[in-house]
Amino acid sequence: MLLLAAFVLLQFLLPLRTTIQIGADEGFELAKATLCLKGYKLYTEVWNDQPPLHTFLITQILKHLSPSILGPRLVTSHFTAVLLTAIFFICLRISGLLVAALTSALLIASPGFLELSSSCMLEIPALAPAVAAMCLLLTSNRTKWPIAQILSGILFGLALGIKFINAILLPLAILVIWVQYRAGAAPARNIARALLVIAASVTVSFVAADFLIDGGSYLRHFQQSWSSHFAATKSFEYGSPNDHPFDWSVPLKNWDTTIPAILGISFSLQQIRKTPMIVLPLAWLALSLIIFGSHKPWWPYYYIHNAIPLCWCAAIGVGAVCQWIRLHGNLASYLLVGVFGICAAAWMGARVYLQVTSIRNSPQTYSSLVLQQIERLKPFAKLIYTEEPIYSFHAGIPMPPQLAVVPLKRLWSGDMTNARIGAEMAQAKPEIILLRSSTTDTPFNDLIAAEYRPVYEDGKHRLYARKSVAKQAGY
């Protein structure tokens, strides 16, 4: 409860209601929700390479509870609380109270965690139910009926209904079941039965959620996700996935966790025979490093997948050092550990402070002059095109459906090209166009020159309106 209270306190320090954008992909998620609120359909009208559950959830929040950005961000905050709770109880069951508390605290202080936990993005909402599923498998008592396995499978299905990346945790769930049943000398058929129950629950919950949300449209349009994530690079206009490898400097910058994690790995390897389940953090860390260390593109928000097992191993290392010092320590060892602890605490505190400060100093809706100008044009506009989709949400004006979500991977796969962007713009002819001031060339420059008038410009943005709209708005 103290750890959750500390996390909530940090959330209160952030301007969640007014910050224009926190996470890198917030704009895409909120632009999709804005289109759904206006009656557009995912996959058929709105390009989307992710399952529909998260978009459905934040759309319902915006429609029925909070029309401001606070609601979608609080969804992520609540999922983060679930994630921290699940991690705490997983570590508590295997490694004890000290390690559980340290793991959660280290995770909160890890690079980018506060930004990710306060953004309307997919990573934590998808990760939380998957980790909660593993927590159920570990902490529930074995009964005649496989209730824990069914609930775990349902949670995994919901996690996959938000983002498929959490399928990488399924091997860890299999490992948990195998270790549990082997420790109890259960016959192999019991292991197979448990795995079959989980697999059936995952499939049923994923398919049921998809059909209830959108009539199974994601199943029919699975190719959008497949081509986006796995198709060969066809266009190099915007670089390629090879330009975005795993940033190995992040674990080095996170030395306060990485160094004790090395000790924790060594200690855990020595304890595997005595405590077989201690293999879980080792397998988790190895799996995350193999997948995310080799996968391209790698984005900074993927680090959360490495941070969880790394923090767990670090907490094990700290616990082992504390135990050794208590039994064999001398003045020199106390001094060494004390100096490291002070330096690590100062480094983590500075990292948290800088994350909070960065978010608090980001542009705010109440001081955005370009949003005020868009408000004047809004009564006459049905569509807006912007290079920063987050402005579509704040303005309450949808983007052209096929142009709302144009990440780099869509451009690399060839699904979207400059020529098609120009054609979509020529067909949609949005009443408002918002470009960055640094943008000098677009696929629709001729369209802007022929049919649009500049109505506002500052150091960051250029705002255009169709000539008829600009005249109606009094420009």
Image: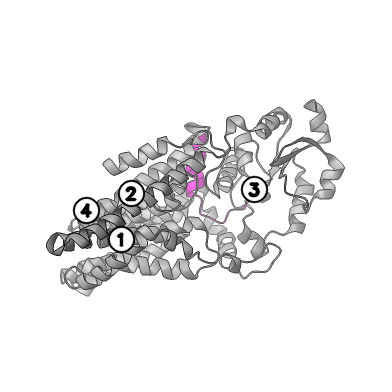
Image coordinates of residue 399 in percent, x first then y, are 67, 43
Provide the residue designation for mark 1.
314
Upstream in sequence: badge 3 or badge 4: 4
Viewer-nearest residue: 30 or 116: 116
Is any part of residue 221 visible from this angle? yes
Q: Contact (CB < 8 A) between labels 1 and 4?
A: no
Which mark is drawn over residue 404? 3
Q: Split into 4 quadrants, where in the image is the C terminus?
A: top right
Q: Give the Cα distance between marks 3 and 1.
A: 41 Å
- Closer to the observer: label 3 or label 1? 1
Q: Give the Cα distance between marks 2 and 4.
A: 15 Å
* Relative to 272, 16 lies left or right: right
Provide the residue designation for mark 4.
98
Q: Give the Cα distance between marks 1 and 2.
A: 16 Å
Q: Identify the magenta region.
A: 44-62
* Relative to 342, 208 lies left or right: right
Disc 4 marks a residue whose amino acid type is: Leu
Viewer-nearest residue: 177 or 472: 472
Disc 3 marks a residue whose amino acid type is: Ala
Q: Give the Cα distance between marks 2 and 3.
A: 32 Å
Mark 2 nearby-residue class (10 Å; few <14, some 14–19, many ≥20): many
Coloring applied to the structure: one colour
